[in-house]
Image (cartoon, rainbow, N blue to C red):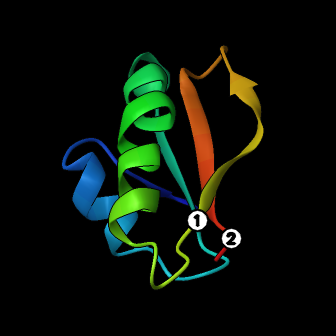
Amino acid sequence: MVKRITENWTAALLNMEVGEVVEFPLEKSESIVGSIIPRLRKRMWREKANWSRDGDYDTENGIFRVKRIA
């Protein structure tokens, strides 16, 4: 089962384990993918932390998935 995140986007991304997948609200995708994840990559450069969108945007359910890849 995939955990659905409804608030505290940055904390949720920081607490993810490598290989973990979580769901976020689709309306927050630009902020999460375009702003928060790039800032976390810079902030956590020593750990080589990285995330990527997992699959397509689910417009029917209003969600998208992010996977911690490193």
Q: Position of residue 69 (x, y in %)?
A: 68, 70
Residue at 59 percent of width and 23 percent of height: 61
Q: Position of residue 23 (x, y in %)?
A: 52, 47
Nearer to the camera, 34 or 46: 46
Q: Assign the N terminus to one quadrant of the image.
A: bottom right
10 Å neighbourhood of mark 1: few (<14), some, or many (≥20)?
some
Q: Amino acid at mark 2?
A: Ile
Q: Quadrant of residue 51?
A: bottom right
Q: Assign the C terminus to one quadrant of the image.
A: bottom right
Nearer to the camera, 62 or 35: 35
Asked if the residue under mark 2 is in contact with the one under mark 1, i.e. CB atoms within 8 Å, the reply is yes
Residue at 37 percent of width and 26 percent of height: 31
Q: Amino acid at mark 1?
A: Asn
Mark 1 and mark 2: Cα distance apart in space: 6 Å
Q: Position of residue 4 (x, y in %)?
A: 43, 51
**Quick one: which residue is furthest to the left in this view?**
8
Nearer to the camera, 58 or 16: 16
Q: Of the numbered discs in the image, which one, if any, rests on residue 50?
A: 1
Residue at 38 percent of width and 33 percent of height: 35
Look at mark 2 in the image and give the residue it sits on. 69
